[in-house]
Image (tube, rainbow, N blue to C red):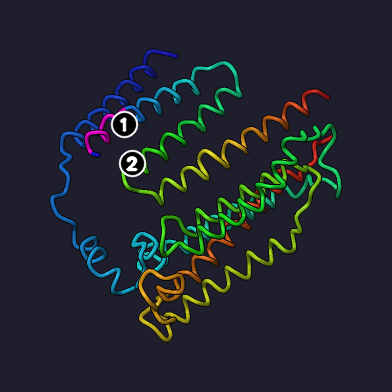
Amino acid sequence: MSILLFPMSLLLAAAMIGSAALALFTTQRITAVLAAGLVSLFASVLFLLLAAPDVAMTEAAIGSGLTTFLFLFVMGRIRRESKQ
Amino acid sequence: MSLPRHTAVFVLLAILGVAFWVLLTGYAPDETLNRSALYYAENTVSDTGAQNIVAAIIVTFRGLDTLGEVTVLFLTAAIVGLVLSHSRAPRKAAGPGILPPGELLTTGARILVPMILLFGAYVFVNGHLTPGGGFQGGAILASGAVLALLADPTRRFSHGAIHLVESTSGVLYVLIGVIGAVIAGGFLDNRILPLGEFGTMLSAGAIPVIYTLIGLKVGAEFSSMLESFEETEDPA
């Protein structure tokens, strides 16, 4: 288990940094929002690997669920208003 | 940017770098648990009768902190409601130019919303046995409410019902804490109810009750916040 754990944690950390960089440097807003949600999703898997399932659940529900939805919702709102 | 500002930024970054470097090189993992952690690890199960030690610590030993967190969330929800209440849309309207949701979303939401709500209730009712608890369950409840709102943007939840659930659970939470201070060991002591058999649904004293109240309160707060966003009207 611990032999698998270390490379998997490294991989997840690299994926988190990668999606964070994507969220920063992409020019498309929707990609940035989804990449920011992806950071939280990888973080929650990492918490699970580090034996903190309670924190993982909070991160998945709030970080990658509600926050992403809120961003998408407000973006849709702005697009609708700017069309008028 | 002028040169002095650049220099200031670099000096600040260097100080931060040194601070983090010192932290990193000085880090040594603890060989043993410190005193409070040792107490929690050894005595939580016998003191509270809860299988999930994390939940037991959050609700009993650190119960006052949890009450503070719930209060902060309540304040946030109240402020969001206050700021957005000036531009509330009339009933049966969600602002002009609303996009109708697709068939896939409405049909899927019909199946998924009850299941998500049930799962949220499962998470906070089983908070003392399995990972999860009031905050997680409440957030899952709120995501069910969000899905319902996405599938039908003109849907309105009753504000009165949400506020009733929220304030009742908040008052009951504090009341249970006060009862604990009167008849048991202290504020938010869970031993006001019998500890029951270890690992069963009705065990760990007042922890399941408190976690259910926290779950309902957090779910109601998140839902009312998201609903306030949904209900605002675009200024015409």
Report the front residue among B166 and A16. A16
Residue carrying label 2 = A49
Number of other residues with Cα within 10 Å of mark 1, as a class: few under 14, some 14 to 19, many 20 or more? some
Q: Earlier in the sequence, mark 1 or mark 2?
A: 1
In the figure, residue B191 lies in which quadrant?
A: bottom left
Q: Which mark is residue B38?
A: none
Q: Amino acid at mark 2?
A: Leu
Q: Position of residue B95 (x, y in %)?
A: 82, 38
Residue carrying label 1 = A8
Q: Are marks 1 and 2 in contact (CB under 8 Å)?
A: yes
Pointers 1 and 2 within a single chain: yes
Question: Residue furthest toward the left?
Answer: B31
Q: Is residue B55 above or below residue A60?
A: below
Q: In percent of the image, x 76 and y 45: which residue is there? A: B231
Q: In percent of the image, x 30 and y 69: which residue is there? A: B45
Q: Position of residue A30 (x, y in %)?
A: 61, 24
In the figure, residue B60 lies in which quadrant?
A: bottom left
Q: Position of residue B159 (x, y in %)?
A: 74, 59
Q: Is residue A57 above or below residue B40?
A: above
The span shown in magenta is A2-10
Q: Is residue B190 left or right of residue B29?
A: right
Instruction: Tell me the quadrant of the picture where the N terminus of chain B can be found.
Output: top left
In the figure, residue B58 lies in which quadrant?
A: bottom left
Q: Is residue B55 left or right of residue B40?
A: right
Q: In percent of the image, x 39 and y 49: which residue is there? A: A53
